[in-house]
Structures are given as structure tokens and as C-alpha cells.
Image: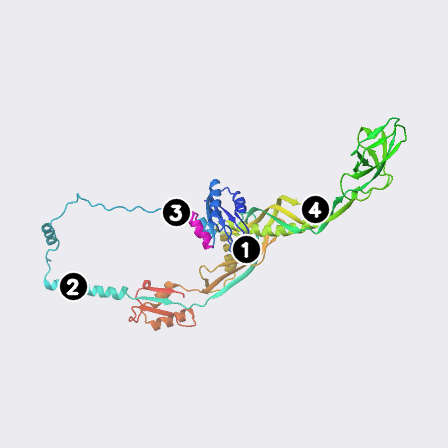
């Protein structure tokens, strides 16, 4: 059954664990606790996580080394496992007690009386028709036959061969190609592309600064009447500068221009927005907002002054670039662990084949140049890599070693190992190159059947010398005969067991 595996970190809590669990689409969810540090040790945390998994229609299981977590999980009925492989192979259900079958006495079975039983025994134990000497002769023949059989079949021997062993090791370069239809060879390994999606965030201190407006600029403007009527300009009227975009100032009092063209009055103004941007030179304010602006002209004879800024920390583009590099390195490590847990049994991940495929989401808070003590970057990325099957890897290593195997030597079973020496380097076609070291143990060629046939019925010392000369051993093999007082090897080869230490 498909199992969704979640790797917890030491800093995870119930909320982050629920977020990881929300991506599950499988009927079983396996939560793997970290080796050091045990998050979610409280029974309430495990209960909340179990109920959330049940609401998603999934069964929750855990892998943890913490006795506290295991004890609480068993109390809640959550299956516990030693590792993800055991979890995928083992059962997630509790065993049910077997019902015992009660013994029933068959009352309908007919019973035999003692007298009838005696009569039956007499019929079975009737006197033999042989005479006394004949019976003695048959007994002696049977006894001699048993003794002969014991002499032939009872003795057994075990031969321990001190075979010299040597390691065969060979390093070679191979290439993993993302095409499972290829046949494995010394230079090419068929590989399967695997991928995962991870998300994370990081914070770095802001290294830049930006001006933060503090106080508004102030000054005076002079209004000039363009009509022969009296013009009243109320307090708070907005005057504008000639820039793009224009800066706005508000009058600090009511201005009444007498009737007549050219009548002038002066009033104080203050910038609508604080900051040094409000410090304008003379003659920079040129318009009055609204319909009244058609009746008058406005101008600032003197520069506006008093606007000030306060420098505050702000992240720069370089800060976000450095944060991106660090976060991608962290997410790459996390993606490698998740892919390793998601691989099915028999598949091996190629170290160095993992790479970021695309950035799905990216957010910055705040944007570069905006006020902020730290730069917080959040990324959601998709990573891809390559995995090879263990059988293909073993076949390639065995082929390479067989081509270089010394004569008169054979392979010791279950000693083959293949190890990647260095991280892989990716090519332009999606394949990766890496170096493998293949190792196994060799020993001189020998046959248990042949050795057994050569030493049947021989004394122990003679058999030792014969085996030593046959296999060119440095010391005599160990021979143990049963029973111990028997000084010869058995007469049948199948009663002799030959093995290495």
C-alpha cells in the first residue's frame, strides 16, 4: 500500500507538522522523527496529529527512537516502527486473538469393555509359529543388521577449510541515463527521474538603509488677484509645485484678496507629506488646486525649508541574493532526504544528481529598498534527481569484476558491494557521470562434493594431509568426527559436511 513519508525537523511543532500532512493523498502517512531532538513529545500533540490524519482519511504511523514518543503513541493506538523500510513491509493493524476451539467429547462413540479388550489383545498377540532356535537366529541377524547400519550411518564428520581469501576491488566510471528501457552495461546505467517539492524561508539582517520621512517642510506663498472681484482662499487650500509628480502643500490660514487686479497677500504653507522632498527652491510652487486657482496666481518667493528624513535599515538586492543562495542550499539538502525516503525498495539515489528544476513561488518581505530590519525570503521549489536500481548496479559491478577475476579463484557469495566514490557531474543531456568502486571477496576454487569423495573412510590425519595437498593450504584443515572415539571418516560422502570458517 502506498505510504506518504514526512520528515520532521527538531524545530517542527504541531502546526508545521499539520502543514506537511495536508499534502498527503495516500491512505497511510508515516511521520519520521529526527535522530536528535524529539518534537511533539506531548500526548496532546500526537493526538491532534492523529485526528488530523483521520480527518484526511489516512492512517498515521511514526518512526522514532524516543521512548517517550513511542510510549505515548502506543497508548493512542498509533503503530510504531524502527525505520521506514519496516513500516512499508510491516502490518499497521493489531493482531487479533485467536479463538480457542473447545474440545467436545463424542458421546455417541461406542465404548469397549475390559473383557472385549483382552480378547482383542489375544488375537493380535498370537504365538509365533517359529521354533525357539529360529527366533534366536532371527534376533541375532536383526541385531547384526542394526549394528552394521549404525557403523555406516551414525558416524559423521565436519571439515573446516582454512581457505585464504583476498579482496578484489576495481574503480571505474559510469554514466546514469534517465531511460529505464536501456540495458545496463559497464558504461551506461538505466536511471529513473525522481522529483519532490519543498518549501522554506530564511531571514538575513538588512545591510542597507533608506530615508524615512520625519518632519514636513514649511514656507510662505504669495497669492495675486487676477480679477476685479474680492477672492477668499480658505485655510487648508492645496497648492502644487511644478515637479512630476507635483508636491502638495496646504495653507495655514485664510487669505482674502481685495478686489482689483494685482492685489497680493501672503500666507504660510506646510507640506502634506513629511520628508526632505518638500524642501523646494523659490518660485517652485505655481498652482492652486480647485476652481479658485483660475482666479489667482501663486508663487513662493522664498524656498521651503524644514523637511527632514531619518535613515532606517532596509534590505538590498544583494541581501536577497545571499538569502536565496543560502535557502536553496538548505532546500537542496531537505529535498535529498525526502527523495531518499520516497524511493521504493531496491532503488538507490545517485549522489550529486539532485538539482533545482524550477521555483514555483517566491516572496520577499519587505521589498528591496523598503524599511525593515531583516530581509525574509520564502521559496517553494521543485527538485529533480536520478535513481538506479540495485540489481542493475550489482550486474554492472559484477561484470566489471568478472572480466578481471584471477584464474583458479571463485567468488565468496554475498560479498559484492558497489559504492559511489564522488558526487556525480551532470551533462547537458540530463545524464550524470560518477565513479563507482566495486568490491568482493575471492577464494580458491573448491568443491565440497569432490573433497568428500576423496576422504571417505580415511583416518583423520590422512584426510587432513590429502585436503591440504589438494587445495595447497597453508595449514591443516579442521576435522571433527562424531562420535569422538571414531578415528575414521564416514564411509558415505553425504555424512561429511565441508565448509569454510
| Cα gap from disc 4 to disc 1, whole angstroms | 59 Å
Q: Earlier in the sequence, mark 1 or mark 2?
A: 2
Question: In which quadrant of the rendered view does residue 436 lie?
Answer: bottom right
Circle number at residue 105: none
Q: Is residue 484 left or right of residue 181?
A: left
Asked if the residue under mark 1 is in contact with the one under mark 4, i.e. CB atoms within 8 Å, the reply is no
Q: Which callout, 3 or 4, points to the residue nearer the camera? A: 4
Q: Is residue 473 left or right of residue 238?
A: left
Secondary element at image label 4: loop
Q: Residue at x 13, y 62 (%)?
A: 135
Which residues are the magenta region? 66-81
| Cα gap from disc 1 to disc 2, whole angstroms | 71 Å
- The location of residue 213, given as percent across then percent down, is 75, 44
* Residue under pointer 2: 139
Residue 76 forms part of the magenta stretch: yes
Q: Which callout, 3 or 1, points to the residue nearer the camera? A: 3
Q: Earlier in the sequence, mark 4 or mark 1?
A: 1
Q: Nearer the viewer, residue 312 or 398?
A: 312
Secondary element at image label 2: helix
Secondary element at image label 1: loop
Q: Residue at x 48, y 45 (%)?
A: 48
Q: Residue at x 13, y 64 (%)?
A: 136
Q: Is residue 331 left or right of residue 303?
A: left
Q: Which callout, 3 or 2, points to the residue nearer the camera? A: 3
Residue 456 forms part of the magenta stretch: no
| Cα gap from disc 3 to disc 1, whole angstroms | 47 Å
* Residue under pointer 1: 186
- The location of residue 55, given as percent across then percent down, is 48, 40
* Residue under pointer 4: 371
Amino acid at each position: 500500500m502506498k505510504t506518504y513519508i514526512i520528515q520532521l525537523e527538531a524545530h517542527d511543532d504541531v502546526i508545521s507538522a499539520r502543514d506537511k500532512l495536508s499534502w498527503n493523498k495516500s491512505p497511510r502517512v508515516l511521520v519520521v522523527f529526527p535522530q536528535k531532538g524529539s518534537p511533539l513529545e506531548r500526548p496532546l500533540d500526537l493526538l491532534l496529529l492523529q485526528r488530523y490524519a483521520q480527518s484526511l482519511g489516512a492512517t498515521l504511523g511514526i518512526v522514532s527512537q524516543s521512548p517517550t514518543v513511542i510510549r505515548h503513541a502506543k497508548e493512542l493506538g498509533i503503530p510504531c516502527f524502527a525505520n521506514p523500510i519496516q513500516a512499508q513491509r510491516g502490518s499497521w493493524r493489531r493482531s487479533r486473538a485467536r479463538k480457542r476451539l473447545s474440545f467436545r467429547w463424542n458421546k455417541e462413540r461406542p465404548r469397549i469393555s475390559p473383557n472385549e479388550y483382552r480378547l482383542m489383545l489375544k488375537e493380535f498377540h498370537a504365538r509365533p509359529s517359529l521354533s525357539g532356535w529360529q527366533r534366536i537366529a532371527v534376533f541375532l541377524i536383526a541385531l547384526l543388521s542394526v549394528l552394521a547400519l549404525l557403523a555406516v550411518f551414525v558416524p559423521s564428520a565436519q571439515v573446516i577449510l582454512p581457505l585464504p581469501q583476498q579482496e578484489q576491488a576495481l574503480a571505474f566510471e559510469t554514466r546514469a541515463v534517465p531511460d529505464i528501457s536501456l540495458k545496463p552495461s559497464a558504461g551506461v546505467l538505466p536511471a529513473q527521474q525522481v522529483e519532490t517539492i519543498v518549501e522554506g524561508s530564511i531571514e538575513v539582517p538588512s545591510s542597507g538603509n533608506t530615508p524615512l520621512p520625519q518632519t514636513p517642510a514649511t514656507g510662505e506663498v504669495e497669492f495675486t488677484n487676477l480679477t476685479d472681484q474680492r477672492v477668499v482662499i480658505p485655510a487648508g487650500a492645496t497648492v502644487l509645485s511644478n515637479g512630476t509628480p507635483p508636491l502638495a502643500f496646504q495653507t495655514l490660514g485664510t487669505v482674502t484678496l481685495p478686489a482689483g487686479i494685482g492685489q497680493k497677500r501672503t500666507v504660510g504653507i506646510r507640506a502634506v507629506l513629511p520628508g526632505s522632498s518638500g524642501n523646494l527652491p523659490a518660485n517652485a510652487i505655481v498652482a492652486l488646486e480647485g476652481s479658485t486657482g483660475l482666479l489667482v496666481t501663486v508663487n513662493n518667493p522664498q524656498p521651503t525649508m524644514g523637511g527632514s528624513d531619518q535613515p532606517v535599515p532596509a534590505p538590498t538586492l544583494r541581501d536577497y541574493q545571499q538569502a536565496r543562495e543560502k535557502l536553496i542550499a538548505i532546500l537542496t539538502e531537505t529535498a535529498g532526504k525526502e527523495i531518499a525516503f520516497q524511493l521504493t525498495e531496491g532503488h538507490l539515489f545517485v549522489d550529486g544528481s539532485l538539482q533545482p528544476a524550477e521555483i514555483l513561488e517566491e516572496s520577499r518581505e519587505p521589498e528591496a529598498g523598503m524599511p525593515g530590519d531583516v530581509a525574509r525570503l520564502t521559496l517553494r521549489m521543485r527538485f529533480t534527481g536520478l535513481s538506479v536500481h540495485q540489481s542493475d548496479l550489482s550486474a554492472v559491478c559484477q561484470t566489471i569484476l568478472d572480466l578481471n577475476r584471477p584464474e583458479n579463484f571463485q567468488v565468496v557469495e554475498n560479498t559484492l558491494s558497489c559504492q559511489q566514490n564522488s558526487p556525480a557531474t551532470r551533462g547537458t543531456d540530463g545524464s550524470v557521470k560518477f565513479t563507482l568502486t566495486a568490491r568482493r571477496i575471492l577464494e580458491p576454487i573448491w568443491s565440497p562434493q569432490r573433497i568428500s569423495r576423496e576422504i571417505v573412510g580415511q583416518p583423520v590425519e590422512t584426510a587432513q594431509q590429502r585436503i591440504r595437498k589438494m587445495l595447497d593450504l597453508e595449514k591443516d584443515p579442521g576435522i571433527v568426527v562424531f562420535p569422538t572415539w571414531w578415528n575414521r571418516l564416514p564411509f558415505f560422502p553425504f555424512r561429511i559436511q565441508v565448509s569454510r570458517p
